[in-house]
Image (spheres, grey):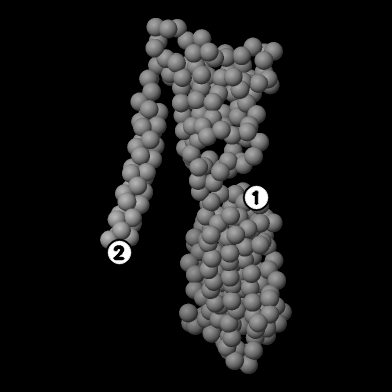
Amino acid sequence: MWRSRYSVLALLTICILFFVAACDTSNKTQSKVNSQSALWEEYISSHTTGLVSRDSNISVRFVGDVATAAQVGKSAEAYIEIIPKVKASVTFSDTKGIVIVPSVELASGAQYNFIIKGKELLKLPTATGLSDYEFIVQVIKQEFEVMLTGISPDPLDNKKMAVHGTLVTADKEDADKIEKIVSSKYLDKGMPLKWEHSFNGKRHEFIISGVERQKKDSSLKISWNGGAIGQDMRGELEVEVPAQGVFKVMDVRAVRGEKPFVGIYFSSNVSTRQNIKGLI
């Protein structure tokens, strides 16, 4: 029993030491980047920084020329080091710039250090005391959220409903993979989803049509599993489907915009000729 306790304690101690060491290494790297000489402003005008998407290119701009016209479009790999290593094309984008185009997507949530070998590239005078310039890029960690945005009657048939939802991702994602995440079931039968994907690949809207109302209230289940995009995120929600002939408010929502309004959604269609004065 005591041996078991000592083993657990030893393992816990090792884990804590490893975590502290990792944090210390990360902090030292960040400190090194933050403490770089202001003299670099005379040589480097800008570079990619902060959070980036997995398929982003990394660019560096210099104050003066670092390449001849003949070198534009040719390899600049000798002057850039990437940690951890990434298979990428590193070329002179023009006489004052270098662009790094990864051959594969960057790892979700990962941090990459880019080291510019300034002494060789810029031929820095020894008197400056400058050698290598380092900067950090953080890749967006992929996550997603599924939201129900409403349930409404079929415009042509009050006996059927349509369920609307949205899946939002932190980083852009392929539409084919997104469509494998969400599924729905009604009365023990799978229901098809129709998708619309935004141009930026981060907002994905879906609709489940043809949900037939029963004689009693029923429910439709929406489930999600992030395995298709490498995320261990699962969940489900149930949507109330009102019985046939039931008329009630299903949702009230404030909509912002140039002309804000409050939308009230009913379980059955309301005639466009209905006089609602005094009803609300």
Closer to the camera in the image, 142 or 152: 142
Asked if labels 1 and 2 touch by Cβ distance under 8 angstroms, the answer is no
Residue 274 higher or lower than 179, as above or below? below
Closer to the camera in the image, 83 or 100: 83
Q: Can residue 13 be seen in this snapshot?
A: yes
Q: Which residue is mark 2?
A: 1
Picture coordinates of residue 228 (x, y %)? 63, 58
Q: Left or right of 21: which side holds 181?
A: right
Q: Amino acid at mark 1?
A: Phe
Under circle 1, the secondary element is: loop
Residue 9 higher or lower than 241, as above or below? above
Picture coordinates of residue 219 (x, y %)? 58, 82
Is the residue marked by circle 1 packed among few (<14), some (14-19), or many (20+) residues within 10 Å?
few
Of the numbered discs in the image, which one, if any, rests on residue 112? Answer: none
Residue 267 higher or lower than 182, as above or below? below
At a point 38% along the width and 35% down the height, the residue shown is: 25
Q: Quick one: quadrant of the N terminus?
A: bottom left
Which residue occupies the extreme bottom position in the image? 215
Q: Can residue 48 be seen in this snapshot?
A: no
Q: How far is mark 2 from mark 1, CA to CA?
A: 60 Å
Q: Amino acid at mark 2?
A: Met
- Name which quarter of the figure residue 213 lies in: bottom right
Q: Nearer the viewer, mark 2 or mark 1?
A: 2
Closer to the camera in the image, 155 or 63: 63
Residue 84 higher or lower than 5, as above or below? above
Of the numbered discs in the image, which one, if any, rests on residue 199? Answer: 1
Under circle 2, the secondary element is: loop
- Name which quarter of the figure residue 194 lies in: bottom right
Picture coordinates of residue 162 (x, y %)? 64, 75
At a point 40% along the width and 16% down the height, the residue shown is: 39
At a point 45% along the width and 16% down the height, the residue shown is: 131
